[in-house]
Image (spheres, rainbow, N blue to C red):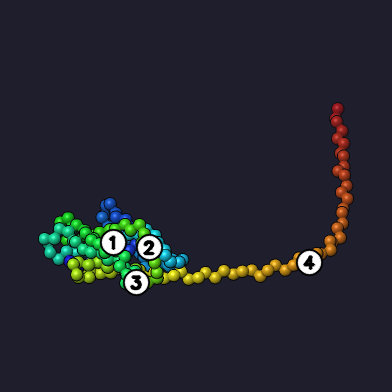
Amino acid sequence: MKLRLIACAQSHAVDQKSNNVSLFNLIEELEPQGFPAVTPPFTFFVNVERSDRGEESAKMRLVVSLGGDVLSDGPFIVGFQGNPRARGFAEIAGIVLSKPGVLAFTLFNGTEKLGEWPILVKPAAATQIEVAPPAKKAVPVAPKRVIFVKKKPPRKVLLKKKG
């Protein structure tokens, strides 16, 4: 069996007409504000090609680890359905990240490592907040001289009636 593609993305779509797959926003790094943290939901995707026409499904193993510590180790099975290639998706609701390190999704066929998708997990850079200097004490100011202008009343205009 040959691994053609392995990836983690924020989301995916399969076109109904062409059956092509689109992966959106590949995940290469995560920067949580602190630890422990939980990843946002994402998609794990693989595309494999069979080497023997007799195989109808690929029974692989997916190992998820963070900094060398195994978080999950379980089966990952995709069906070929008579085709030479198969693809598999896993919708992952979230993974608890206890520390910084490399979050690795490693795919095995038996004991053979087919491939890996590493995601660098690093703490978010500290945000620098600028603090304004304290306001100066208000100094009373003498009022300016104000001049009032007296308005003239409007003039009355008388109109004469004809007739």
Residue type at mark 4 is Val
Q: Secondary structure at mark 3?
A: loop
The picture places residue 17, in percent across and down from the top left corner, at 27, 52
Q: Earlier in the sequence, mark 4 or mark 2?
A: 2
Disc nearest the viewer among 4 and 3 = 3
Q: Earlier in the sequence, mark 3 or mark 1?
A: 1
- Between the C-alphas of marks 1 and 4, the distance is 68 Å
Q: For the residues labelled 3 and 1, say whether their Cβ atoms are less than 8 Å apart.
A: no
Tag 3: Cα neighbours inside 10 Å, few (<14), some, or many (≥20)? some
Q: Earlier in the sequence, mark 1 or mark 2?
A: 1
Tell me the residue that label 4 is attached to.
Answer: 139
Q: Is residue 131 left or right of residue 115?
A: right
- Can you say whether 137 is above or below 17 in the image? below
Tell me the residue that label 2 is attached to.
Answer: 96
Tell me the residue that label 3 is attached to.
Answer: 67
- Between the C-alphas of marks 3 and 1, the distance is 21 Å
Q: Earlier in the sequence, mark 2 or mark 3?
A: 3
Residue type at mark 3 is Gly
- Between the C-alphas of marks 4 and 2, the distance is 56 Å
In the picture, the disc for residue 45 is 1
Q: Secondary structure at mark 1?
A: strand
Disc nearest the viewer among 3 and 1 = 3
Q: Is residue 6 left or right of residue 110?
A: right
User: Looking at the image, which is closer to me, 122 or 98?
Assistant: 98
Residue type at mark 2 is Val
Tag 4: Cα neighbours inside 10 Å, few (<14), some, or many (≥20)? few
Residue 94 lies in quadrant? bottom left
